[in-house]
């Protein structure tokens, strides 16, 4: 339950921080921290425009996409406090529920019959597919390390003790953050601020969404960031008491958001045609984690 | 119910079949399909009663004396057979129902329909009998009846050369499979002197388990479609009429799985090694199948490749179960085999659903090329929804039944990580990654297929306006969806059945100790989360409906990114959707392009054609390579078969003379 509240709070300012950092890096003052939330609130009040080619799929898809993210949020734990839903193998449920949301966002893009949106949909499907094994190998390795198979038990049993496990936590952070970038279509994979539809991924998929539906999609995006941030936090807090872990949660979330902002300010997007390979490299990082875990457990005998 | 009545059920079913097929020839054209459905239904009821009886705990067994040559034939239904019989029955009856509507749209002469429906009845019954016979020779007969009847069902459109070719390809490959099975059975016969299945277990006792099991695995694996033995599948399934492809893909490939399971019940040793072999082949099968499914434009061929993928998933479960037997780990045994058996059921459901709804599309549009279609959701909304449900379920996405079986397999993989063996752990982690990649690509495949066929607007004008298909075709699909939902939301019932089944199957694991029943409480909880998830969707939907009430709702053209004259042909096609994936895996997915380059002196270019299609790696590189060389070698012996009768008579004389001489000179004794 605690994780739910924390994620909701974090999602309110996470995207705001990214925007603020980007503005400051380019020498502007930038909007307030809660501008993204205000944007969504404004969208919720607006009317909608539907494309004449679309069917019911287009109308229902944003709701399902949003619900899938909410459902995934319920699974995420916070330190020793369980998520709203917690069971053995819940991280599989987490990944598959998010995949259902993606399924619907992809077909809703194809529902408009626009070639640009089809292109974005195809890229989204491809990239998220390549990110999948990285996440599963990471979680599988952690399950191997701790002997547990649910998010909460895995994270509670993670002990940062030796140098190797520090290295593992850092690699794990890297993998989770990159997966978050793929899931949220952010900088090294996709540039949300690009002006050409041909080079967009996520933004081009939602070109035809408007009003309440667009608000839902944006909210889902904010939540997703905070969810992955919370997973990263979980790698570090273990069984710390709340008076340390809750401030740590916010510090880490802010650091991550700042990091994303800085990356977006000073880095160029990967070449579109090589994106898939870049993402697949994540899998090999996950494999490094796996070998690290084998070393810690002394299986190389 | 006692043995007598159970036995007479089978007698009734045989009598009904013979009577039904006979009267099929005298029934007016209009009612042939109805009669066939009736006969299949009666057979289904009779054999299902038997199967349910067995699942309730009463094994059924009798011996039938077939004279001097075959000897006593053991007929037995245990819970494993019963599970498969029920799956066969359900898919066959939905197939027959759907087929009766599907064939109505075409004008077929009476003899063709007679043959078709008679074969369908035989085909169904032969599959049931394959699951019951426990005697090698009789088993091969039933197996052969099944292969032949299904081959004749495949070539229903026999006027198309492609269909005939696919049929012959299927026929040949099925006989290679039979060859392997025969070798296996004969090997057992020579060692033990009996054709009864029980003696396979006695064979496995003192002898090495690996080679015989691998021979059976190849034999049954050709039927099931494990890579690289799969090459018949992507040809036969698209060629067959849709109700037949639904049944073939839904159950006939599963009989290969049944055979493998049956052999596993006899195994005595080497579980670990065999498990590792099976799991490795299965991961490759799964990834290869779904990669090919992702790129094909022919939607029935896509579904055929997707069947190969699912066989891979089932195989992963089988491998896990074998590893469980090897390690003496009951949890792994239950999760692996339980996941595999549940996925057999699940796949038979959603794959037949997908083939039926795809068949409805084909019936209305007469094309299997998805890039010619588009926007069908407006013309065929019910078919579109059914296909969508199938597409979500087959990707293993919640809240449908596919997730339950895949979740069991994932749980099994994670349980397996607790092993101490480095190679096992590594294999399982790679399998975990493989399974997740399969899931990812299957999302890509089915969003592509659903999006291209049903969404957007039509890419090519069709000659006939497609419209929603008849109720008789929709009804079986609704039935399938109902069963799928029952698995998703009441998995406890199915898991308990599997628990008992697995307890009966192997004496080496104590049932109920820490098996599925220990685990299934947890897995059955997943349905609560499904309900929660649906609740969240419903709540968001209500909030949305409330929020947009009274606000302006406009219908406008799709935003063309400032381009003012878009047309339907500009829509993203299925081919381009999966092009980037195809490029990345171009070492495996060979694309063949046919076109003429612009010649240097060609100032005014003429109309030209561009064609591209994907080749199957194994068929192109492996099978064709071998057959090409075989044909090349055979060419040298062409002079023997020269078509002159005089020569053939001469061969006969030489043969008889040489036998005669050899006998006289005591060379042949």
Image (cartoon, rainbow, N blue to C red):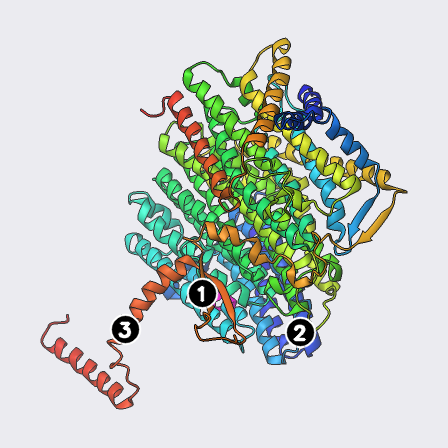
The answer to whether tags 3 and 1 share a subunit is yes
Q: Measure the alpha-carbon separation of dots 3 and 1.
A: 27 Å
- When the figure is inspected, residue B575 is found, relative to residue A128, above or below; the finding is below
Which residue occupies 78% across, 29% down? Answer: A38
Which residue occupies 52% across, 49% down? Answer: B310
Q: Chain of mark 3?
A: B
Residue A24 appears left or right of A38 = left
- Image location of residue B580, percent across then percent down: 52, 51
> SS class of the residue under badge 1?
helix
Which residue occupies 28% across, 82% down? Answer: B641
Q: Earlier in the sequence, mark 3 or mark 1?
A: 1
Q: Earlier in the sequence, mark 3 or mark 2?
A: 2
Q: Which residues are magenta?
A: B145-150
- When the figure is inspected, residue B314 is found, relative to residue B503, above or below; the finding is below
> SS class of the residue under badge 3?
helix
Numbered disc in front, either 3 or 2: 3
- When the figure is inspected, residue B479 is found, relative to residue B458, above or below; the finding is above
Name the residue at the right extreme: B550
Q: Measure the alpha-carbon separation of dots 2 and 1.
A: 26 Å
- Disc 1 crowd, CA 10 A, few/some/many (<14, 14-19, 20+): some
- Image location of residue A108, percent across then percent down: 69, 48
Q: Which residue is mark 3?
A: B634
Residue A276 appears left or right of B182 = right
Q: Which residue is mark 2?
A: B32
- Disc 2 crowd, CA 10 A, few/some/many (<14, 14-19, 20+): many
The numbered disc on residue B144 is 1
Q: Measure the alpha-carbon separation of dots 3 and 2.
A: 46 Å
- Image location of residue B662, percent across then percent down: 13, 76
Name the residue at the bottom extreme: B646
Which one is nearer the viewer's eye here, B210 or B443?
B443
């Amino acid at each position: 339950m605690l994780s739910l509240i924390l994620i909701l709070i974090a999602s309110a300012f996470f995207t705001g921080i990214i925007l603020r950092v980007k503005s400051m890096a380019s020498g502007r003052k930038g909007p307030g921290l809660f501008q993204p939330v205000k944007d969504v609130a404004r969208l919720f009040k607006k009317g909608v425009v539907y494309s004449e080619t679309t069917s019911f799929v287009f109308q229902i898809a944003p709701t399902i996409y949003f619900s899938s993210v909410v459902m995934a949020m319920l699974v995420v734990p916070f330190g020793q406090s369980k998520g709203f839903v917690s069971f053995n193998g819940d991280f599989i449920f987490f990944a598959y529920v998010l995949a259902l949301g993606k399924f619907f966002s992809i077909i809703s893009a194809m529902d408009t019959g626009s070639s640009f949106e089809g292109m974005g949909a195809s890229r989204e499907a491809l990239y998220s597919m390549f990110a999948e094994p990285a996440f599963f190998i990471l979680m599988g390795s952690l399950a191997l390390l701790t002997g547990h198979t649910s998010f909460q038990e895995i994270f509670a049993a993670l002990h940062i003790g030796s140098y190797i496990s520090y290295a593992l936590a850092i690699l794990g952070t890297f993998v989770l953050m990159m997966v978050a970038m793929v899931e949220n279509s952010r900088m090294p994979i996709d540039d949300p601020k690009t002006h050409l539809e041909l080079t967009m991924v996520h933004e081009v998929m939602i070109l035809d969404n408007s009003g309440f539906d667009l608000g839902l999609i944006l909210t889902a995006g904010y939540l997703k960031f905070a969810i992955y941030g919370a997973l990263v936090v979980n790698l570090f807090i273990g069984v710390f008491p709340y008076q340390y872990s809750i401030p740590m949660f916010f510090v880490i979330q802010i650091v991550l958001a700042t990091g994303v902002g800085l990356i977006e300010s000073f880095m160029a997007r990967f070449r579109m045609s090589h994106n898939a390979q870049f993402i697949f490299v994540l899998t090999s990082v996950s494999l490094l984690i796996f070998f690290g875990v084998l070393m810690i457990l002394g299986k190389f005998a | 119910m006692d043995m007598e009545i159970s036995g007479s059920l089978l007698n009734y079913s045989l009598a009904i079949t013979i009577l039904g097929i006979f009267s099929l020839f005298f029934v007016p054209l209009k009612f042939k399909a109805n009669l066939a459905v009736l006969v299949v239904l009666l057979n289904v009821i009779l054999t299902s009663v038997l199967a349910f009886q067995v699942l309730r705990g009463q094994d059924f067994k009798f011996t039938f004396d077939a004279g001097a040559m075959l000897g006593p034939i053991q007929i037995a239904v245990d819970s494993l057979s019963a599970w498969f019989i029920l799956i066969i029955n359900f898919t066959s009856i939905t197939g027959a129902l759907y087929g009766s509507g599907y064939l109505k749209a075409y004008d077929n002469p009476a003899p063709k329909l007679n043959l078709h429906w008679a074969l369908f009845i035989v085909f169904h019954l032969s599959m049931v009998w394959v699951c019951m016979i426990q005697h090698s020779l009789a088993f091969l007969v039933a197996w052969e009846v099944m292969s032949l009847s299904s081959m004749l069902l495949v070539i229903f459109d026999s006027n198309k050369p492609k269909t005939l070719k696919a049929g012959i390809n299927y026929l040949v490959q099925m006989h290679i499979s039979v060859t392997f099975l025969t070798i296996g059975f004969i090997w057992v016969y020579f060692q033990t002197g009996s054709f009864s299945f029980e003696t396979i277990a006695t064979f496995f006792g003192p002898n090495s388990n690996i080679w015989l099991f691998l021979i059976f695995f190849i034999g049954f694996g050709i039927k099931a479609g494990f890579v690289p033995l799969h090459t018949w599948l992507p040809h036969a399934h698209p060629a067959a009429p849709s109700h037949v492809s639904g049944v073939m893909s839904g159950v006939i490939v599963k009989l290969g799985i049944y055979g493998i399971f049956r052999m596993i019940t006899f195994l005595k040793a080497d579980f670990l090694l065999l498990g590792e072999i099976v799991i490795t082949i299965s991961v490759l099968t799964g990834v290869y199948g779904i990669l090919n499914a992702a790129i094909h434009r022919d939607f029935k061929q896509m579904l055929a490749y997707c069947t190969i993928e699912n066989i891979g998933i089932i195989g992963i479960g089988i491998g896990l179960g074998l590893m469980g037997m090897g390690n003496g780990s009951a949890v792994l045994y239950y999760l692996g085999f339980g996941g595999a058996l549940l996925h057999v059921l699940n796949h038979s459901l959603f794959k037949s659903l997908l083939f039926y709804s795809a068949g409805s599309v084909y019936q209305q549009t007469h094309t299997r090329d998805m890039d010619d279609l588009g926007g069908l959701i407006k013309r065929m909304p019910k078919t579109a929804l059914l296909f969508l449900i199938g597409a979500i379920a087959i990707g293993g996405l919640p809240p449908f039944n596919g997730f339950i079986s895949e979740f069991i397999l994932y749980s099994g993989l994670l349980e397996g990580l607790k092993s101490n063996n480095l190679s096992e752990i590594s294999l399982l982690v790679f399998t975990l990654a493989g399974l997740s990649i399969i899931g990812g690509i299957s999302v890509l495949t089915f969003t592509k297929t659903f999006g291209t066929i049903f969404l957007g607007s039509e890419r090519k004008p069709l000659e006939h306006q497609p419209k929603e298909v008849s109720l008789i075709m929709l009804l079986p699909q609704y039935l399938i969806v109902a069963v799928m939902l029952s698995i998703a939301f009441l998995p406890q019932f199915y898991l308990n059945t599997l628990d008992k089944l697995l307890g009966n199957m192997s004496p080496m694991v104590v049932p109920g100790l820490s098996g599925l029943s220990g685990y299934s409480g947890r897995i059955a909880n997943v349905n609560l989360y499904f309900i929660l998830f649906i609740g969240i969707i419903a709540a968001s939907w209500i909030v949305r409906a409330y929020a947009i009430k009274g606000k302006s709702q406009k219908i406008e053209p799709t935003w063309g990114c400032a381009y003012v004259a878009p047309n339907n042909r500009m829509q993203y096609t299925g081919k381009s959707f999966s092009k980037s994936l195809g490029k990345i895996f171009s070492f495996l997915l060979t694309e063949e392009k046919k076109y003429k380059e612009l010649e240097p002196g060609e100032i005014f270019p003429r109309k030209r054609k561009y064609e591209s299609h994907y080749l199957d790696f194994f068929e192109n590189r492996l099978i064709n390579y071998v057959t090409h060389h075989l044909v090349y070698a055979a060419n040298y012996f062409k002079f023997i078969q020269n078509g002159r009768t005089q020569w053939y008579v001469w061969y006969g004389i030489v043969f008889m003379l040489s036998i005669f001489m050899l006998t006289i000179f005591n060379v042949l004794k």
